[in-house]
Image: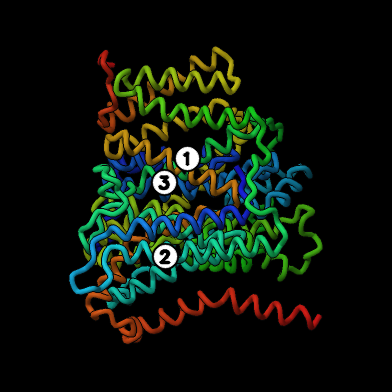
Amino acid sequence: MLEHILVAGGLVFQPYVLMVIFVAGAYGLFVGSIPGLTATMATALLVPVTFFMDPVPALAAIVTMEAMAIFAGDIPGALVRIPGTPSSAAYVDESHALTLAGKAGFVLGTDVIVAAIGGLIGSLILIVLAPFLAEVAMQFTCYEYFWLACIGLSCSVLVSKGSLIKGLISLLIGLMMTTVGVSETFGFARFTFGSTDLMNGFNFIPAMIGMFGVSEVMRNVSTGDLSGTQCAVILKNMFKGVGKTVRKYKLNIMRSSLLGTAVGILPGAGADIGAWIAYALSKKFSKTPEKYGTGHIEGIVDAGTANNAGLSGAWVPALVFGIPGDSITAIVIGVLFMKGLKPGPMIFQQTPEILYAVYITFILANLLLIPFGFMAILAGCQMLRVPRKILMPVILIFCIVGAFAINNATFDVGIMLFCGILAYFMEVNDIPVAPAILGLVLGRLLEDSFMVSMIKSEWQLMSFLERPVSLVLGVVTIILWTSPFIAAWLFKKKVPEQ
Amino acid sequence: MRLSNSLIGFCAIVFGLAVMMYTRGFPAQPDGLPGPEFFPNVLAGLFIVAGIGLALGSIRRGERILHAQWVGLGAAAVVNILLVLGIIVTYMLVADHVGFLLTSLILMAFLMKWLGTSWQWTILMSATVTMGIYLLFAKILMVPLPWGLWGF
């Protein structure tokens, strides 16, 4: 183990990788600070650049960028009451109320410290949990992988916002997209309509750039105000009282770190859901719940810790099973495949140095968050002034070139366009995009594991329940599938009683 | 465009049926067991079930049936969206002939100006960003960006 850590340390602490980490960190802080731009979009735009890097700098860039972006979302939330990313939405009113009370420095100083602590605790959980789960996953066969894919996809629908049926439709869209191209099991080209470009199916990266980049540009240009956000907050006494606050709420920080990581592990549930749950629990268990909403730091401590802890949690199922915990790790899985690395338990045996490099980067990124975050807070108002009428055309051209760069193919730009329109249409109609992304990532695994299992067992469906682990996973899946109906039935039963 | 839930459900049903029709042309397995059509057909079936569920729920709630409207978008917003899409299509059509540098510069400048950026910022930013992207992708990452007929 020590040998792997030393090798991984040697891979990370190189001038080139450190430079990549610094640049990715600055990029993450900038994107996170601009309302309307998400960390997922930033990841999708980063991938065409990481495509040309070795695995370690590529993954280090994504890890650092996402940690910085999620924290940076707090900056506009506190300064102008607009969350920079959805992960900061849970406590935006609370943060802004403190800013109005002249405590902008205090709230942002607390944000950056608890984000770093949450990120570090989440990283430690990732380091401890992932190898243990990988040992278990070594015993898995196609039957277990089929159920795991089902659990991942079901969770993505169950935790999606809004209507469950719309979540299911979104998932089906993603899964249907994976049926385009030559079927690996049967060697037959499906839904290609005679196009040789479609033989390999939808290229994942242009699809992601379209769904998160182009759709964001479309959404932004459709809003009336494209100018920058004016901000005139004076930041003073930053970090004054932060240490006392952290000590006072140390149990909250521990609870929210664990909660955020656990929510992050659930496929489809990202940092934003973790923050909402942590905020709600914070209020429920607080000694002073009446202060919430009036500018109380306790809720910010909880939610700000949980959202950064959730990032590393999402990497656990991604690395161990190849099942993404959120939209960002869905893209990471695509990056790993591009680098010739197949996420799953074998990665722990074949390329442990890359995994340890990821762990080291997580710790490094969260430590760097404090000085980087401090500088970003000081530059917060300046970053907010950048007008979207300049940013959007820049992002659009970057999307086009990024989609093109993966295969040097104009066809991929067409895929990006199609996916951008699709994602925009889905968002306008309250159809969540996240299940479609998970469907797009897991569709092939789902079909292949099912078909291989069926061919192996000569179409004996009960073979899916014959192995003990497979049986447990199957029961969990069936519980997940039936839970909405049981919940609806219980709710109906309860309502007449009242 | 915002569609009513019943219309989304209807679209899902039609899509599911279309997939089922299309997969009838897929080759059958020699032993009669399910083949490449199996997984798409399962998904198509689920599309139909979800579509029916969404449509029935919508009707039960008394929502307008098979209704579509442009919600919250003025004419300017629609034009902006169409312009973004038009820029992507234009890039696909002309970049190989005109080259990356000129295409990117013109399209970015056009969109910036259209969205209300001043001439100074439009020229400065579109030129700087085009050169930045060119240096990053073409020189550092060695991506063969389209050169165009004039070789730049």
In the rendered image, which quarter is residue A356 located in?
Answer: bottom left
Is residue A137 positioned above or below A105 on the image?
below
Front residue (pair A335, A257)? A335
SS of the residue under disc 1: helix
SS of the residue under disc 3: helix
Inter-mark Cα distance, 2 to 3:
25 Å
| Position of residue A433 measured from the top left corner of the image (x, y, whole percent) | 51, 52
| Position of residue B140 measured from the top left corner of the image (x, y, whole percent) | 28, 30
| Position of residue A458 measured from the top left corner of the image (x, y, whole percent) | 23, 80
Kindly identify the amino acid type of the residue bearing the numbered disc 1: Gly
Counting residues from the N terminus, which is met first, the one under dot 1 or under dot 3? 3
SS of the residue under disc 2: helix
Counting residues from the N terminus, which is met first, the one under dot 2 or under dot 3? 2
According to the picture, the residue beneath numbered tag 1 turns out to be A213
Inter-mark Cα distance, 1 to 3:
8 Å
Mark 2 crowdedness (10 Å alpha carbons): few <14, some 14-19, many ≥20? many
According to the picture, the residue beneath numbered tag 3 turns out to be A208
